[in-house]
Amino acid sequence: MNPHDFAALRTPEGLALLDSLRDYDPARELAVATRLRREHPAGLVSAALGQARLRQRAVAKFGAEDAYRMFFTPGGVEMATRASVAAYRADRFSALGVRSLADLCCGIGGDAIALARAGIRVLAVDRDPLTAAVARANAEALGLEGLIEVREADVTEVDTAGYDAVFLDPARRGGRGRTFDPEAYSPPLSWAVRAAGSARFAAVKIAPGIPHEAVPAEAEAEWISDHGDVKEAVLWFGTSPGAVRSTLLPGPHSLCPGNPLPDPEPGPVGRWLYEPDGAVIRAHLVAEVAAELDGRLIDPTIAYVTADELRPTPYATAYEITDVLPFNLKKLKALLREREVGILTVKKRGSAIEPEELRRKVKPQGRNAATVFLTRVAGAPSVLIGSPASPAR
């Protein structure tokens, strides 16, 4: 889609065409396109069909109510912050007293929308003409144009001195796909950190796989998950230098110790096994969860916590363990067959065997369910068998 096609989509004809495609089936696109081209220009039909597909994809991130009013680019859908994560971050900025913010590399405006809904005045900047036009259209479509000013510009040339805070979301994709080198971001992380230093408060969105040693000493590092999926990491400036935080949504539930604990001593597998949330693991806060559970590791190198008692925690999923076995495929297959396990969930940590490979080899059959953990216990390849803890327990 180019700026001309996008402008056509925003005309009364284009908007009506988009509304008519809300529930269309992409599998029937050829027939739908043929029918619509009898009444509308071919270019407009192609743009509308492409936008309809993007809106359907965007529902997972923005919800149907917003997604079907907004506009998207393919890259914008891919890189946009999930609405729940953006809302959490906007609430953090609001709690800090931020009333105006420069959103640099704003993309299609997902974060700017959340910030504006939190009552924050936003300058949203992107250098791509089409992306900036889409962000502006989204602010208008959601009735937020009074709080969001969209500017097409190079973020490195924007003066942010008049704003309470800065938020930066550098592009982490290049011509060859996703980049894992922070200095290959656009703009580079080093520039983003310098720009963050110009404001009282700032946040820089980064890839969750960033090494801890790459985190600047003056930053607070936060890893965020939503419904168990790690979505992003954020460097906060002006909050708690050197702090490490894991935040789980919905909630939010935030784990942010003053002084990180050393790893607990490993020990034998108890009745309960806890699988820490990915944000906890990325933040290196498994020891804090183990202490909360009065638990221990099953292996010095494995992020599974075991305990003898079941305790509620938002930071880990609990399983009741019935069997702890040395890894032996033939014995495992026989045991699962004996127990008539046909619904098999396979998890792995510290094992070279892939879950699908194990399923093919054991051929689960039966009416019962079980969870199998492929892991190491005290350095030895092992299999743990169990089931999720009952919420009522």
Image (spheres, rainbow, N blue to C red):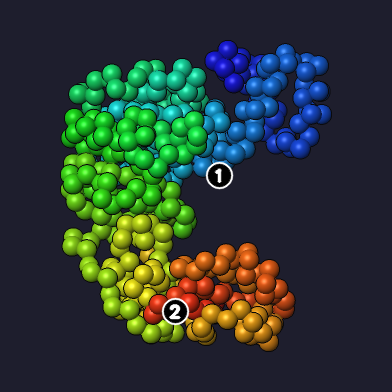
322 relative position to 270: left or right: right
In the figure, 159 relative to 167: above or below?
above
341 relative position to 260: left or right: right
Image point (36%, 61%), residue name: 281
- Secondary structure at badge 1 equals helix
Q: Please state which of the two labelled residues, at mark 1 or mark 2, is closer to the viewer.
A: 2
Identify the mark at residue 60; answer none if there is no mark.
1
Q: Front-most of 101 and 328?
A: 328
Image point (19%, 51%), residue name: 242
Q: Earlier in the sequence, mark 1 or mark 2?
A: 1
Identify the mark at residue 380; answer none if there is no mark.
2
Q: Return the x and y of residue 238 as percentages of the image width and height.
A: 18, 41
In the figure, 250 relative to 76: above or below?
below
Choose top left, top right, bottom left or bottom right for residue 345.
bottom right
The answer to whether marks 1 and 2 mark residues whose Cβ atoms lie closer than 8 Å is no
Q: Return the x and y of residue 23 as percentages of the image width and height.
A: 70, 36
Graded by Cα atoms within 10 Å as few (under 14), some (14 to 19) or many (20 or more), the crowding at tag 1 reads few
In the figure, 356 relative to 10: above or below?
below
146 relative position to 79: left or right: left
Does residue 352 appear anywhere in the picture?
A: yes
Q: Front-most of 8 and 125?
A: 125
**Amino acid at the residue labelled 2:** Ala
**Amino acid at the residue labelled 1:** Ala
Image point (32%, 36%), residue name: 183
63 relative position to 85: left or right: right
Q: Quadrant of the N terminus?
A: top right
- Secondary structure at badge 2 equals strand
Q: Return the x and y of residue 62 as percentages of the image width and height.
A: 51, 40
Using the numbered discs, state the Cα–Cα distance from disc 1 to disc 2 in whole angstroms: 41 Å
In the figure, 325 relative to 77: above or below?
below
Image point (21%, 23%), residue name: 162
